[in-house]
Image: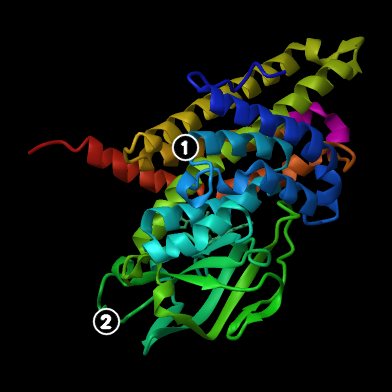
C-alpha cells in the first residue's frame, strides 16, 4: 500500500516521525474525517493529538522548545496529514508560516515571547495578506497602519484568513507610510504587524472584529474568516522585525515555504485518491470482471500513480533546496503548480473510477473532489506560479549582449 511516494535518504529520526504521523492519520484522522467535514465541525480532538505529537513545533528551533526539524520533514508530515484530511493540514499550515516568519525575521524579544508558546500549540498563528479586492496582487493592499506615539493605528478589511477564528496571533500585512513617503514602491511601504487576539468571533479585541466563518464548498472544519480593523491599536514592538517597510519581503519568504507546504498537501490528497481508486477498481465488477482488469481503468491507474510519484519528487526537491540554504522560489513554484494540478486530475480520475457512487456522500472521494480545487488557489494561483517560474527562468537563462 505504500509503494508510491517513498523518499530516499531520510535519517532515523525523520523515519520515526513519519511513521508516528502515518499511524496517527490512519487511526485518528481517516476514520472520522468525512463525518466531521460533512458537519463542518472543528477537529478539536485531532488538534489536541497533533499538539501531543509536537507537530505545532516541528520546525521551531529546539532552543524555543520545538523539534528543530527541516522543511523536508515538515512537508512530509503535511503530506501524510493531508492524505487523511486536507483541512487538518490547513490548521497547522498558517501556524507554521507565522512561526517561520518569526524565526527568520522576528526581533529577539518577539521570538522569546511567541515561539515557545507556539511550539506547544498554545499560541496559534494565522497570516493575512488578502483583502476583499485583492489576492494575487498583493501590492494593491489598502489596509493601513499609521504611527501614533508608541503605537500603530490599523484600519482596513482583510479576507480569507485560514484559522481566523481559532488563531491567537495574526501576522497582518498592511501599508505603513511612516518613513515611506507618497510614491514609495508598494513593496517597500508594507509592514507585517503581529496582532494578538482572543480566539473566537465578534469583537475579539478592541478595534478588531472576526465576523464569522465563510461558508465554503470544501476545506471545511477549518475556519476561514474575514478580519476587520477599526482603529486597532498595536504597540510599536509588534512590528515584525522592529522595522517598517519590510513586510512584503517577510510575507513572500513565508509564502515560499508555504508553497512547498501546499504542494505537499496536493501530494497527500492525490495519494489518498489513488488509494481509493485502486481499491474500488478491484472490488467493482462489470462485464464479468473487476473494472481494474479493463485496460481503460488500468491506464487511468497508471496515469494517476505516475502523477503521484512526479508531484512527490518535485515537492521533495523544493523542500531540500530550501533546507540547503539555497533560494527555492523556482522549485517551490513548480512543485506547487504541478502538485495542485495533478492532485485535481488524480482526484477526478478516482472519482470517475467510482462511477455513480463517487457522487454519493457515503464515499470519501466525494469529499476529496470538493477539497482539491482549493489547492489550485491557495498560496498563489496556477497563473501566479507560472509568472514566478517564467520570470526566474528568464533570469537564469538571460542571453548576453
Ligand atoms: C479557502 C481559502 C483560504 C485562504 N486562506 C488565506 C490566508 O490564510 N491568508 C491569506 O492572506 N489569503 C488566503 N486566501 C486567499 C488566497 O491566497 C487568494 O484567494 C488567492 O491568492 C487568489 O486571489 P483572489 O482570490 O483575489 O483572485 P484574483 O487575484 O482576483 O485572481 C482571479 C483570477 O485571475 C487570475 N489572475 C490574477 N492576476 C493575473 C495575472 N497577472 N495574469 C494572469 N492571471 C491573473 C488568477 O490566477 C485567477 O484565476 C485563501 C483563499 C481561500 C479560497
The location of residue 122, given as percent across then percent down, is 63, 59
Q: Is 318 situated left or right of 34 in this image?
A: left
Asked whether 376 or 205 is in front, the reply is: 205
The location of residue 85, given as percent across then percent down, is 72, 42
Q: What is the CA distance from the residue labelled 2 to the residue labelled 1?
A: 41 Å
The quarter of the rendered structure image containing the C terminus is top left
Q: Is residue 307 visible?
A: no
Q: Is 8 situated left or right of 53 in this image?
A: left
The quarter of the rendered structure image containing the N terminus is top right
Q: Secondary structure at mark 2?
A: loop
Q: Is 44 situated left or right of 194 in this image?
A: right
Q: Which residues are magenta?
A: 350-358
- The residue indicated by pointer 1 is 70
Give residue 182's mark.
2
> Residue at coordinates 71% horizontally, 51% vertically from top-left?
219
Q: Classify 10 Å Cα crowding around label 2: few (below 14), some (14-19), many (20 and above).
A: few
Asked whether 215 or 8 is in front, the reply is: 8
Amino acid at each position: 500500500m505504500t509503494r508510491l511516494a517513498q523518499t530516499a535518504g531520510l535519517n532515523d529520526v525523520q523515519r520515526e516521525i513519519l511513521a508516528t504521523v502515518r499511524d496517527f492519520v490512519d487511526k485518528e484522522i481517516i476514520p472520522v474525517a468525512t463525518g466531521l467535514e460533512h458537519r463542518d465541525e472543528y477537529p478539536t480532538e485531532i488538534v489536541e493529538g497533533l499538539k501531543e505529537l509536537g507537530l505545532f513545533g516541528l520546525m521551531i528551533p529546539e532552543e524555543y522548545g520545538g523539534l528543530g526539524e527541516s522543511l523536508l520533514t515538515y512537508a512530509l508530515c503535511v503530506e501524510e496529514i493531508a492524505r487523511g484530511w486536507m483541512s487538518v493540514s490547513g490548521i497547522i499550515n498558517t501556524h507554521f508560516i507565522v512561526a517561520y516568519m518569526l524565526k527568520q525575521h522576528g526581533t529577539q524579544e518577539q521570538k522569546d515571547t511567541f515561539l515557545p508558546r507556539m511550539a506547544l500549540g498554545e499560541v496559534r498563528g494565522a497570516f493575512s495578506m488578502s483583502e476583499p479586492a485583492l489576492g494575487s496582487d498583493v501590492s494593491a493592499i489598502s489596509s493601513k497602519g499609521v504611527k501614533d506615539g508608541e503605537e500603530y493605528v490599523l484600519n482596513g478589511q482583510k479576507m480569507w484568513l485560514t484559522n481566523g477564528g481559532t488563531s491567537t496571533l495574526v501576522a497582518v500585512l498592511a501599508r505603513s507610510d511612516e518613513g515611506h513617503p507618497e510614491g514609495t514602491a508598494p513593496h517597500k511601504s508594507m509592514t507585517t504587524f503581529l496582532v494578538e487576539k482572543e480566539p473566537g468571533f465578534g469583537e475579539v479585541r478592541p478595534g478588531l472584529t472576526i465576523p464569522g466563518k465563510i461558508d465554503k464548498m470544501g476545506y471545511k472544519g477549518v475556519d476561514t474568516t474575514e478580519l476587520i480593523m477599526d482603529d486597532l491599536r498595536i504597540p510599536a514592538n509588534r512590528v515584525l522585525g522592529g522595522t517598517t517597510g519590510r513586510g512584503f519581503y517577510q510575507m513572500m519568504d513565508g509564502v515560499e515555504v508555504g508553497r512547498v507546504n501546499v504542494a505537499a498537501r496536493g501530494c497527500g490528497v492525490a495519494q489518498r485518491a489513488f488509494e481509493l481508486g485502486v481499491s474500488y477498481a478491484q472490488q467493482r465488477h462489470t462485464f464479468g470482471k473487476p473494472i481494474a482488469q479493463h485496460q481503460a481503468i488500468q491506464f487511468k491507474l497508471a496515469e494517476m500513480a505516475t502523477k503521484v510519484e512526479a508531484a512527490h519528487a518535485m515537492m521533495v526537491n523544493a523542500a531540500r533546496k530550501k533546507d540547503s540554504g539555497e533560494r527555492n522560489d523556482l522549485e517551490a513554484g513548480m512543485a506547487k503548480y504541478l502538485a495542485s494540478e495533478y492532485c485535481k486530475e488524480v482526484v477526478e480520475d478516482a472519482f470517475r473510477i467510482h462511477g455513480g457512487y463517487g457522487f454519493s456522500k457515503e464515499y470519501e472521494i466525494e469529499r476529496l473532489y470538493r477539497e482539491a480545487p482549493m489547492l489550485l488557489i491557495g498560496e498563489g494561483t496556477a497563473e501566479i506560479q507560472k509568472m514566478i517560474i517564467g520570470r526566474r527562468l528568464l533570469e537564469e537563462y538571460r542571453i548576453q549582449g
